Image: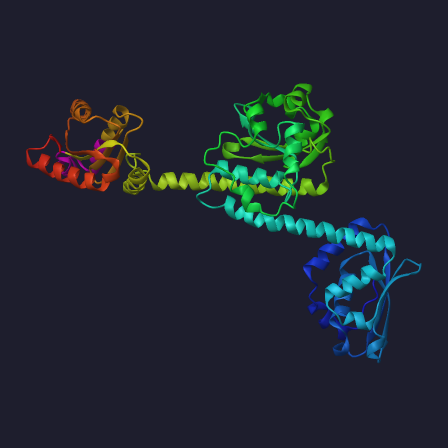
Amino acid sequence: MNVKLPEKYQPKIKSAYVNPGVTLLLENFTKEVLFDFEVMIKIHSDPFKVPDNLYKLIKICNSFSIFTIKSIEETNCIEEQKVELKRFQMEIVVEINYETLQKEESIVVYEIIKNSSTLLGSMLTDILLNSSKIANVFRASKIILEKGYKPETSIDEMLYITMTAITGGFAGGFNRAILFVEDSGDFKVHRVIGPESDREADKTYEKFETLERNIESYLSQYKSKMNYFSNLEKKIKGITFKKELLVNNDLFKYSIESNATIKLPVSRFNEMIVNLLDLKGEVAISPIEIDDGRLAFYLCDNRYNGKPITDDQLEILDYYAKESWMMWQNKIYQSLLKKDAQIDPLTKVGNRRSYENYISSIKYLKNQQIALVVIDLDNFKEVNDTYGHEEGDKLLKGFAQLCVDNLRKKDSIFRYGGDEFVIILEVVKKEEIYSILKRINRKLKETMNITFSAGVAYGNSHEIDLLFKIADQNLYMAKGQGKNKIMIN
């Protein structure tokens, strides 16, 4: 049990701020050492003449059980203040004098390492290097995650970004990453990054004459709707395994049920899986859950350099796997919101916003002949006034469904407002337009005893704004001629 300092020092101890880096260093250090330290403190009798670092060291001793304050001696000489650490009933391991206590925390840590025994100094240095490595990985992850979370980034690109991080030398450093997704109750190879063979691996590693630091250059290699992320994916994409082959594996089952990233020897896998995936040595498994409760998991290995999978690699894989799960869910949620925002809740066809987005894309991305049709249901106001809005809603829903059933897949329909709809017929001949609309109008009359009037404009998709104006004018003319008319420019 620690000897407690007099009450006069307590406010200063409680307010002492210890750098989180030092806290992390000590947390890792306490996991490594198998012995305790006795701490002897010589402190000035005036609390205001005590260096801040001495208060920080006392706070550290109170926080970690491997340190026990065995003695406290007050002094009236400022320069006599110091801290001594020694192994239990053995020699002094390190002494921190007043001169050192006045310096920056980093200098204090340096002095401790420099003046420690070889064993203790090497342990602390190793922890610092590993902490720096993890810090560098998460510095890279900031760039990766910012790109992955962008609204315009698709799920496919997000997976490419994640798997690049898992395999990149700037992060996970695995040779290969294979993503399996549950499909009809089985597991199917969905996406893969990594070399196809030893020869390709050798060629890949030959390129890395310098450190892999330019993360953006890797992420920018993604092309929209890439068929394959790698040559290995060409070879194994679509391979499906019965779920039982994996779930019956106790370690794999534990990984799924506990949502834990683990490593396991290849010998624990079914021989067919080992041969099809060309597995050797050991692999890492990291499970995630995607839409509708479907399972997925990353299988990663160091197949080509033959190195053991390290704890750091497992930690990084676990981090990116869970981040990809959150990004995946986010993309699904965004997609649903986007879809809901562009669907008319009554008729379930596109709304005005959806129409505006559609024409902004077709105007610049396509160059084709289209027909733009503006439709207005005849006598709709009278139906509402006579039979009520509920009957009017039935007409709107019935008309929208009739159009969906009788238009081609490449055609689009939008509820523009009220009982006005816009239909866009893509890649259509002018002489076909009238027959298509006439057929829909006839079926509308037969099934719902109502007709529509339509204004049509035919021309190039680049001029879609002008086409809408012409179609709207033609609708006005059609209604002026007695309704149930189709007016084409």
Q: In this picture, is 322 found above or below 28?
A: above
Residue 190 appears at what percent x and percent y? 54, 29
Any magenta on residue 238? no
Relative to 54, 159 lies left or right? left
Examine the image and state in which quarter residue 246 appears: top right
Looking at the rendered image, the quarter that the N terminus falls into is bottom right
Q: In this picture, is 385 found above or below 275?
A: below
Relative to 489, 299 lies left or right? right
Main secondary structure of the magenta stretch:
helix
Residue 251 appears at what percent x and percent y? 70, 30
Q: Residue furthest right?
A: 90
Does the image show residue 187? Answer: no
Residue 449 appears at what percent x and percent y? 15, 26
Examine the image and state in which quarter residue 182 appears: top right
Residue 355 appears at what percent x and percent y? 28, 39
Return the residue nearer the eye: 247 or 145. Answer: 145
**Which residues are drawn in magenta?**
378-397
Looking at the rendered image, the quarter that the C terminus falls into is top left
Relative to 195, 388 lies left or right? left
